[in-house]
Image (spheres, grey):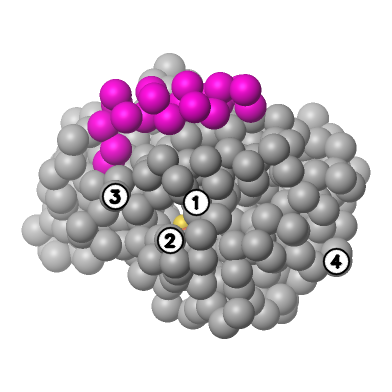
């Protein structure tokens, strides 16, 4: 699969088939916590980064087998709303495979653009992020392209909320020492009052980020922040669910592992959940990939994370 990945066992969406619409790390932001690593193409240009017809053909081929999925999710290793064909792809999914909920994970930066807002309007769930309101904190966490300001992002989110009938889960990624100060949290709460999301999802580092100095927020702090945002239905995003397994036969395990690690560092447990393969088979695949220098490992609180070298 060239444009599809997984299904991955998503923390928020269950068993989710990923759709990656832009080349590796094409994004208008370069977030310090990004699990895909440094942004290599920092841009806010909307374009057909990969052929829309090819993505539709790949989705059609996959979904025609009626796989068990909880969602088809636009995400991956860059910003999906930069792709000019995302609206046509969502229309295809909603018309031909309406039983699969469609989710869009976005940084929300492009929502100032009415055309981009319209293109994702048929998605069932949109999960945008907003990590900071103060320009200096926004610049330090999200490191945006060009003239992107937090106020413009908020205005885009407010306009989207007014037009969009689906669910908006607003994600706030906590970077301790930067956006967890009282003054920044108060500003974020005020922004949430304007945006009116259906839910707020408090996130924190779960796997290695782009910058080594970024640390996870501790649970006590996260619980306090969750309480602070309680009027908006806040929740802390937990670890991945462990019970569901991908409904597919993984014929080439190494290939499936590469496909997943190219998009996000993962533990053995993550890979077991995403591929449905046995732990022993995965451990031996990872060991030979380590030996050949193809991947590296890093220990974090949740365990040993493997990533492409
Ligand atoms: S976290 Fe998302 S928005 Fe931030 S750099 Fe990574 S892909 Fe882009």
Rendered location of residue 249, percent (x, y): 47, 35
Q: Find disc 3 in the rendering and name its residue.
A: 177
Q: Find disc 2 in the rendering and name its residue.
A: 137
Q: CA distance from mark 1 to mark 4?
A: 24 Å
Boundaries of the magenta span:
216-236
Label 1: how many Cα within 10 Å (few below 14, some 14–19, many 20+): many
Rendered location of residue 284, percent (x, y): 16, 42
The mark nearer the N terminus, 4 or 2, is 4
Helix, strand or loop at label 3? It is: loop
Q: Find disc 4 in the rendering and name its residue.
A: 115
Q: Nearer the viewer, mark 1 or mark 3?
A: 3
The mark nearer the N terminus, 3 or 4, is 4
**Dots 1, 3 in contact, CB < 8 A:** no
The mark nearer the N terminus, 2 or 3, is 2
Q: What residue is drawn where x is 73% and y is 52%? A: 157
Could you tell me what secondary structure mostly forms the magenta stretch?
helix
| Numbered badge on residue 262 | none
Tell me: residue 52, above or below residue 240: below
Q: Find disc 1 in the rendering and name its residue.
A: 131
**Dots 2, 3 in contact, CB < 8 A:** no
The mark nearer the N terminus, 1 or 4, is 4
The mark nearer the N terminus, 1 or 3, is 1
**Dots 2, 1 in contact, CB < 8 A:** yes
Magenta residue check for 218: yes
Q: What residue is drawn where x is 60% and y is 69%? A: 149
Q: What residue is drawn where x is 86% and y is 37%? A: 165
């Amino acid at each position: 699969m060239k444009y599809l990945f997984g299904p991955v066992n998503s923390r928020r969406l269950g068993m989710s088939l990923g759709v990656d619409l832009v080349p590796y790390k094409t994004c208008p932001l370069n977030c310090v916590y990004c699990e895909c690593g440094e942004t290599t193409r920092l841009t806010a240009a909307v374009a057909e980064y990969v052929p829309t017809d090819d993505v539709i053909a790949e989705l059609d081929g996959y979904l025609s087998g009626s796989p068990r999925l909880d969602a088809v999710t636009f995400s991956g290793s860059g910003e999906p709303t930069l792709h000019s064909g995302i609206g046509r792809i969502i229309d295809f999914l909603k018309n031909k495979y309406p039983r699969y909920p469609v989710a869009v994970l976005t940084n929300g930066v492009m929502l100032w653009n009415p055309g981009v807002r319209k293109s994702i309007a048929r998605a069932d769930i949109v999960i945008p992020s907003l990590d900071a309101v103060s320009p200096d904190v926004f610049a330090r966490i999200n490191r945006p392209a060009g003239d992107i300001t937090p106020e413009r992002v908020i205005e885009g989110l407010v306009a989207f909320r007014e037009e969009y009938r689906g669910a908006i889960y607003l994600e706030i990624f906590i970077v301790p020492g930067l956006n967890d100060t009282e003054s920044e949290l108060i500003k974020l709460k005020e922004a949430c009052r304007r945006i009116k999301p259906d839910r707020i999802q408090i996130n924190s580092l779960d796997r290695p980020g782009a910058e080594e100095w970024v640390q996870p927020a501790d649970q006590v702090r996260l619980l306090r922040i969750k309480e602070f945002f309680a009027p908006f239905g806040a929740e802390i995003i937990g670890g991945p669910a462990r019970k569901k397994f991908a409904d597919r036969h993984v014929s080439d395990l190494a290939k499936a592992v590469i496909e997943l690690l190219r998009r996000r560092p993962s533990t053995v447990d993550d890979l077991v959940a995403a591929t449905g393969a046995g732990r022993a088979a995965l451990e031996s695949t990872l060991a030979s990939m380590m030996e050949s220098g193809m991947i590296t490992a890093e220990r974090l609180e949740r365990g040993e994370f493997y990533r492409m070298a």
